[in-house]
Image (cartoon, rainbow, N blue to C red):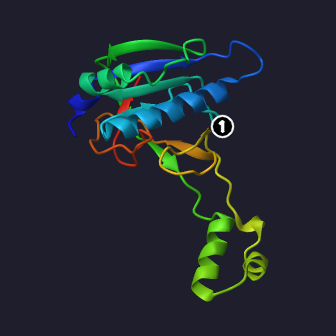
Amino acid sequence: MSTSMLSHFIQVRCLSPDQEITVSDIMSRAFYRLHGAIASLQTSEVGVSFPNHTLMSVGDVLRVHGSKDALGRLLDGGWLFRMEDYTLSSGLMPVPEQVKYRCVSRGRAKSSAPRLRKRLMRRHGLSDQEAERLIPDSVEKRLKLPSISVCSKGTSTRSYPIFIKHGPLLDAPVSAAFSGYGLSSEATVPWF
C-alpha cells in the first residue's frame, strides 16, 4: 500500500447533547459502525486515529484515513446514518502537507487470567476449579491504555474493549494493511 492511499481523511467529532449518553458511548457506536462499514467494503486500506486521546480515553475525535475513493465509498455507505445529532463530520478532506506519522494499533494484554486458565485446562485436562486455583485473577496485567467498547459484526460476542496503542511519532510513513477496525501494528497514519 502506498502512502498516497492515505491522502484524505474524514474527521468525526463526537458530541454529548444530553446527560443520558456520553461522548464515550457515541465514540463506541461510531467506531462499531465504522468497523461494519470496513467489513462490508472488504478493504484493508482504511486506517483510524484518535488525535485527542489521553492516557485513559480515546477522546472525542475519530479520524478516518484512506484514499479519496475508499473514503468516498465509506461516506456513500452511510456509516454515520442517524448519528447526525451526536456527531459532526468534516466530510472528505485532503491530508495537510506537513505531517508526522504514527502507528495506531490494538493493545493486548498477554496475561488474561481466563485465557491462561482455558489454555491450562486444554493442555493438562484440568477442571475449572483446579485451573482457577492455579491461575488466580491476581496474575492478570491490566492495560493502561485508552479503550473503546465494541461488538464484532462477525461474531455474536457481547461488547468487549479494544485497547488503543499509539506508537511514537515518525518522520516517514510505513505502508502495510489495516485490520477491520482500521488499526495496524505496522502501518502508520498521518498525524496532525
Report x, y in % for residue 151: 57, 43
Pinpoint residue 73: horizontal percent, then vertical percent. 31, 24
Q: Is residue 141 left or right of residue 183?
A: right
Residue pictured at 72% horizontal, 79% vertical: 131
Q: Residue at x 57, y 45 (%)?
A: 163
Q: Nearer the viewer, residue 66 or 100?
A: 66
State whether residue 95 is above or below residue 66.
Answer: above
Relative vertical location of residue 142 with respect to residue 65 in this rendering, above or below:
below
Q: Residue furthest bottom?
A: 124
In this view of the protein, which residue sits in the foreground, 82 or 164? 82
Q: What x and y, as percent, mark residue 11?
A: 45, 19
> Farthest front residue?
156
- Taking depth in this image into account, of 25 and 6 the one nearest to the observer is 25
Task: Tell me if 111 is positioned left or right of 88 in this view.
Answer: right
Quadrant of the image containing the C terminus: top left
Q: Is residue 53 visible?
A: no
Q: Quadrant of residue 41?
A: top left
Residue at 47 percent of width and 48 percent of height: 154
Residue 14 position in % (x across, y down): 58, 19
Badge 1 is on which residue? 56
Counting labels gives 1
Q: Residue at x 59, y 28 (%)?
A: 27
Location of the N terminus (image quadrant): top left
Q: Amino acid at mark 1?
A: Met
Left or right position of 13 against 172: right
Question: Is 80 drawn above or below residue 153 in the view shown?
Answer: above
Tag 1 secondary structure: loop
